Image: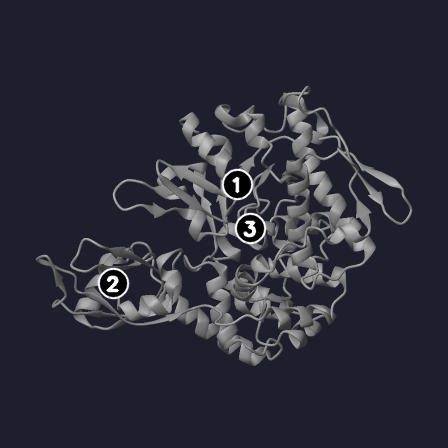
Amino acid sequence: MSPMQNNRNNFQPDELDRLLFEAFPGLVMRKDLTQTLRGMSKAPSYVLEFMLGKYCADLFDETAVREGLELVQEEVARYIPRGDETEVIKASIRQRPPRRLIDLVQVTLDERLDSGVFWASLVTANIHNVNIHDKTVEQYDRLLTAGIWCNVLVNYDDSYRYRGQTYPFVIQRLEPVQVGRVDLDEYRAGRARFTRDQWIDVLIRTMGYEPAHPALTQRVKLLYLVRMIALVEANYHMIELGPRQTGKSFCFTELSPYGTLLAGGAVTVPKLFVTTVGRSAPGLIRSQDVIGFDEIAGSTFNKDDDKNLYKNYMESGQVSRGTITVTGEAGFVFNGNINYDPRQGMEADHLFKPLPMTVSDDTAFHDRWAAYLPGWEMPPIKPEMLTHHVGFILDYIAELFHRELRHAGSYGNLWEQWFARPEGEWSERDRRSIVRTFSGLAKLVFPSGEMQKEDARLLLELALELRLRVRLQLHEIDSKEFSLTSFSYVDRETGESRSVTIEV
């Protein structure tokens, strides 16, 4: 039996599938189809799902799904380049122009040539200095930042010459492979048809996991959502250390084009913050919503100045180098692998110890984390945990997070209609961290901002716990400065004070 037939036979629509399909027609996708295509190319899941959405619109018509999937498989194989095909593609464009490709297109302005020339790069095909029309760049300005996956028609014209050099490759036509429009009011109206727990399950299925699997308790589901907070909440900084293969990097590599994963934690200060040599240019903090630092335990901060740039940005959302100040909204998420479970006995002085020596004991650095996600609680991803049901098309949800929820204002004070914080217990950084975590979770689960008291309690207690874990590690490093080892809140109706405590 082919993988396609196997996935088709495994799809048994349930009530949540049908409700989601009715509430968001054309914006949802069967995740088993995505899994069939994943690994066939270098294209991320949000690109593959956009293509699937085009050809497999009726998710319950098996004949149409089979035919649509075959078309997408054919397009992926034919038009998305492999890394070793660069010279073959260049030769085919020259010999038989034009050629269609599906690729990530990024554009830069070369101000040295004449009055300034835009150059496009076809990232997967590894073809650079491609001519692109100014009007195309004006129409899709995101080409100048993170780039856009596009259907492109590339022509060959050796009359394009600059300063005696020939640049023959020309983008003749470009069509973004992404959702064109999102509407927050429509999204909120659709959300109103679901219960809280149903909606959490929708988001979990959107990520590709099956919420009915025994390993996905309500707590694990909420921790999965915490990983997405930086996509809806500006300047949200979080750390997660835990075992390998638990899906820590998914939000940076598969879910959204507005996330970037820096493998090995290696990145230059100019690339991350701002270039000061020659023509100044802002770095990734300006173009991305979230920047993941993978395997951070193996990286280094070479100079104190570098470390201070991180600290200044994480505190204020801006960074200065020389006379240049750059403001950004990107959140930093530090990911790393630890091979022990802190709940079974600490193998280090504190849970920041696996980080580079230059920052592991720096309390000022770690005090800027809004949350420490306990990665050791996340289950390793196994095939049976992947869903065969319906979730949002990733590009749709990524665009809605980026364009709408991220700029919808803070939801961080919604809990205050039922609860209050004790006077003098939380520091200002504690308060900001808790508010940002609560706001991000509320945007994800209650995008209209409407919730009940116990809903607010659930999110508030998780926000308190995630910040408290940071405080506990700070206490282990410097107990004199950070003496508090519990957080509490007060029920306005009953006057009851409830404490949130954890062991690690």
Instruction: Provide residue 346's location: percent of width, then percent of height.
Output: 67, 24
Ranked by sequence position, the earlier of labels 2 and 3 is 2
Q: CA distance from mark 2 to mark 3?
A: 40 Å
The residue indicated by pointer 2 is 89
- Residue 341 makes an appearance in the image: no
- Disc 2 on helix, strand or loop? helix
Instruction: Provide residue 140's location: percent of width, then percent of height.
Output: 38, 67
Q: Residues within 10 Å of mark 3 (few under 14, many from 20)?
A: many
Rendered-image quadrant of the C terminus: top right
Amino acid type, label 3: Ala
Ranked by sequence position, the earlier of labels 1 and 2 is 2
Q: CA distance from mark 1 to mark 2?
A: 46 Å
Instruction: Provide residue 367's location: percent of width, then percent of height.
Output: 60, 32
Q: In the image, which is nearer the foreground, mark 2 or mark 3?
A: 3
Please tell me the numbered disc located at residue 234. 3
Amino acid type, label 1: Ser
Q: Are marks 1 and 3 in contact (CB under 8 Å)?
A: no
> In the drawing, does residue 59 fall left or right of residue 85?
right
